[in-house]
Image (cartoon, rainbow, N blue to C red):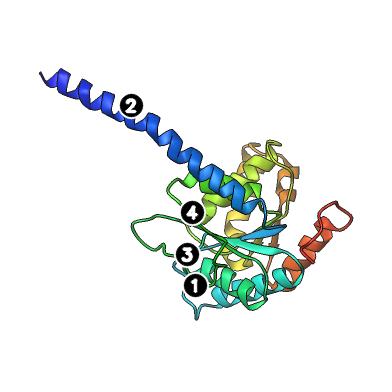
Amino acid sequence: MRLEKHSKAWNEIKTNDSWAIFKIMGEFVNGYEKLSKIGPCVSIFGSARTKPEDSYYLLAESIAKRIVEAGYGVITGGGPGIMEAGNKGAHLGGGTSVGLNIELPFEQHDNPYIDSDKSLDFDYFFVRKVMFVKYSQGFVVMPGGFGTLDELFEAITLIQTHKIERFPIILVGTKFWEGLLGWIKSTLLESFGNISAKDLDLIHLVDNEDEVVAILDSFYNGSDLSPNF
């Protein structure tokens, strides 16, 4: 009897999994349709817990404003903290401000600086991550937590394995990132040989908005990509 009960529950799970495919497909289709029209954009990542008075919030806002003034749009995760700062800077700069929001039990809610027609909601992290990578011409990574690290290493892995084209990955905040980069160099590269020296060329470490824009412009200067002017 107990085995029969578990078997029935397992069959219900498998049925629900099959129907979930259509919901996943719907998120991909909606994302592709909306984001294919936004033009060249740069994603800004960072902690949802960063307060508006924090220096990194203010820096993210300034970076986003400079990015849209340079002709790119800005994509964030659509929530509070650094994400809000990114959308706010893009909004103040009069540029494209996109938010890819996700349903979470805490922290996440739409911020008010996303363009009304460029706010997307996702249930699935993996669908949302595809949208970030597919429609971004660069990643600006501010101080953050596990989610920020997840997006950072996802991008590095996909570029390293040639699954996507190279684009700039810019870490902002020497004080925050230098420990991680030091560990990557001393442990992954030098002690264990788990990465190649050239893999570190994917990453730029900066402290201000001028450096961010200079890296983006330098990378795309002479390419077929044109900003949104």
User: In this rendering, which labeled residue sits more in front, label 4 or label 3?
Assistant: 3
x, y percentage for residue 52? 49, 78
Element assignment for label 4: helix
Q: In the image, 97: left or right of 121?
A: right
Image x and y of residue 46, in percent? 54, 62
Gap between marks 2 and 1 measured at Cα: 39 Å
Res. 132 visible in picture: yes
Q: Which mark is residue 14?
A: 2
Q: Are marks 2 and 4 in contact (CB under 8 Å)?
A: no
Query: Which residue appears at 47% of the width and 47% of the height?
Result: 125
Tell me the residue that label 3 is attached to: 79
- Which amino acid, by three-letter code, is at mark 3? Gly
Looking at the image, is 183 positioned above or below residue 118? above
For discs 2 and 4, the disc positioned in front in the rendered view = 2
Residue 157: name its quadrant: top right
User: Which residue carries the number 4 mark?
Assistant: 147
Quote the CA–CA distance across marks 1 and 3: 9 Å
CA separation, marks 1 and 4? 21 Å
Q: Specify which label sits upstream in the sequence, 1 or 3.
A: 3
- Mark 1, mark 3: which one is toward the viewer? 1
CB under 8 Å between discs 2 and 1: no
Residue at 67 percent of width and 75 percent of height = 94
Which residue is at the front of the view, 30 or 1? Answer: 30
- Disc nearer the start of the sequence (2/4): 2
Query: Separation of disc 2 and disc 4 at Cα?
Result: 29 Å
Dot 1 falls on a residue whose secondary structure is: loop
Q: Earlier in the sequence, mark 3 or mark 2?
A: 2
Q: Say if residue 170 shows up in the picture.
A: no
Disc 4 marks a residue whose amino acid type is: Gly
Residue where numbered disc 1 is placed:
112
Compared across the picture, whether 126 is left or right of 213 comes to: left
Image coordinates for residue 69, horizontal then vertical, percent: 74, 73
